[in-house]
Amino acid sequence: MTPGGLPVLRLNVACGQDGEELTLDVTMTGQAAREVAARLSAGDGVYVAGRLRAVARHARSGIRTTGIEVIASEVRPWAG
């Protein structure tokens, strides 16, 4: 929840295949975020649609890196 009362859903989604390790941060806001959060449990498969955003991150060591975050317009359970 933002200070203004807007619901926020944050997920870490494992996207790698066959030995590849790729985890993406996913953020969704608004009433849809609240509804999706009520339907998901840890470990559930998800389908995510949205746009990519570059984000600056600071490691504990002080090193600055750039990562990728998905700003989701849609998140739903996926049985895949």
Image (tube, rainbow, N blue to C red):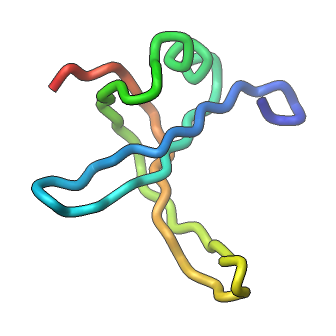
Quarter of image, res 2: top right
Query: Residue at horizontal 62%, vertical 73%?
Result: 56
Please provide percent x and percent y for residue 27: 55, 41
Please provide percent x and percent y for residue 33: 57, 23
Picture quarter with the N terminus: top right
As drawn, the residue found furthest toward the right would be 3
Quarter of image, res 46: top left
| Horizontal arrangement in the rendering, residue 15 relative to residue 34 (left or right) | left
Q: Nearer the viewer, residue 50 or 26?
A: 26
Query: From what the image shows, is residue 72 above or below residue 15?
Result: above
Please provide percent x and percent y for residue 74: 41, 28
Query: From what the image shows, is residue 72 above or below residue 41?
Result: below
Query: From what the image shows, is residue 40 above or below residue 11?
Result: above
| Horizontal arrangement in the rendering, residue 27 relative to residue 70 (left or right) | right
Query: Residue at horizontal 42%, vertical 50%?
Result: 51
Picture quarter with the C terminus: top left
Quarter of image, res 42: top left
Query: From what the image shows, is residue 62 above or below residue 2?
Result: below
As drawn, the residue found furthest toward the left would be 18
Total numbered circles: 0
Query: Residue at horizontal 33%, vertical 47%?
Result: 14
| Horizontal arrangement in the rendering, residue 35 relative to residue 39 (left or right) | right
Please provide percent x and percent y for residue 30: 64, 24
